[in-house]
Image: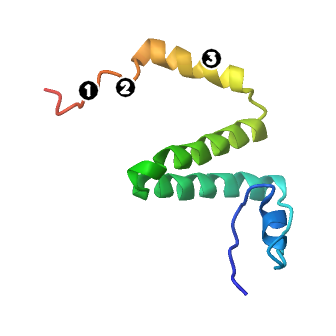
Amino acid sequence: MIIYNKLVRDKIPQIIEATGKKANIKVLDDKEYEAELDAKLLEELKEYTSAPVNEKVEELADLVELVYAILDNKGISIDDFEKVRIAKQEKRGAFKERLYLLSVE
């Protein structure tokens, strides 16, 4: 038996069982789910930063899926999130110019 103790995508138990194995799962309560979303976000960020170049887009898709799940869990629509993102971009800019702050005197 392999112990995972981590949040997984909704279809993972069926995928596991299709291989003839048994997936032992539990449904998380609200507090557990929020904590596991945060933990999964860190896990996926580490996977993105260590992924080879040809796998980075797939890892970014995992990160975005988690952002959407976190927003949904907090009752925030993607449209409302985009409004916050755009407002912040208008106030502070984006990252298109590749600026790297060396110091401030």
Say which residue label 3 marks.
83
Specify the quadrant that holds the C terminus. top left
Kind of residue sitting beneath label 2: Phe
Specify the quadrant that holds the N terminus. bottom right
Rendered residue at 84%/72% (across/down): 17
Q: Nearer the viewer, residue 20 or 22?
A: 20
Q: Residue furthest top?
A: 90
Say which residue label 2 marks.
95
Give yes or no for contact between labels 2 and 3 (Cβ–Cβ under 8 Å).
no
Q: Residue 65 appears at what percent x and percent y?
A: 66, 43
Q: Residue 18 appears at what percent x and percent y?
A: 83, 70
Say which residue label 1 marks.
99
**Residue 16 lies in quadrant:** bottom right
Rendered residue at 54%/49% (across/down): 59
Q: Residue 66 appears at what percent x and percent y?
A: 65, 45
Is 75 rendered above or below residue 97?
below
| Disc 2 crowd, CA 10 A, few/some/many (<14, 14-19, 20+) | few
In primary-sequence order, the first of circles 2 and 3 is: 3
